Image: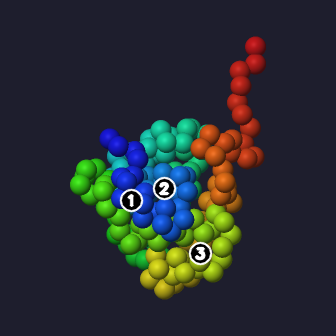
Amino acid sequence: MSIVASNRCVEVLETVGCDDFEIGLLPALRHLCVSAESADPKSWALAFDIAVERFGESIGLPAAHGLNKIVLALFDCRGGGPEVKDPLCPKAKRDITDDEVQFLSMIHHMRRDNSAAARSAVAFVTRGRMDPALIRSGLTFANRFPAGMGRHARVVGRPKLSVVA
């Protein structure tokens, strides 16, 4: 199982300004969308596994959880999910859909507090609706994972567990 987006996908996402964190969300996004569409718990679990493998537990688990909330809000808003490539098909991993680009662009702009560009991306992924639940879940995610956060950065506001003898 490959957890990294293909070079073509990376090139497209870099063109719209996505950073490594946002690019790393693509495989998890695809699995979460498949899971929401088909109620397949394996896809949901794979999304979380991929996020943990990519970002570590302290960032990957809350990132996958937050991403799942955005995906579910989008499904509710649209009455169905965005068009995504099959996350298990090696040939499909080489390409990226407009919905995937705009979804990650929405997250990109929300993480940078770029309201105008975020609104445009929201309008695209929702087919013209400014859905409060989707916007709230996206902004919550953006607040938890602001731009500039490194791959192994500690999640702000979470205590680090340690064993005391």
Amino acid type for the residue under numbered disc 3? Ala
**Quadrant where the N terminus is found in the figure:** top left
Task: Give residue 100's quadrant in the image.
Answer: bottom left
Residue at the far top in the pictured view: 165
Q: Residue at x 66, y 77 (%)?
A: 115
Q: Residue at x 43, y 52 (%)?
A: 28
Residue bearing the label numbered 3: 118
Task: Give residue 96's quadrant in the image.
Answer: bottom left
Earlier in the chain: of badge 2 and badge 1, it is 1
Q: Residue at x 42, y 64 (%)?
A: 12
Q: Nearer the viewer, mark 1 or mark 3?
A: 1
Q: Nearer the viewer, mark 2 or mark 3?
A: 2
Q: Nearer the viewer, residue 143 or 70?
A: 143
Residue at the far bottom in the pictured view: 128
Q: CA distance from mark 2 to mark 1?
A: 8 Å
Above or below residue 36? Residue 5 is: above
Above or below residue 134? Residue 50 is: above
Residue bearing the label numbered 2: 23
Secondary element at image label 3: helix
CB atoms of marks 2 and 1 within 8 Å: yes
Question: Can you tell which mark lies on residue 82?
Answer: none
Residue bearing the label numbered 1: 9
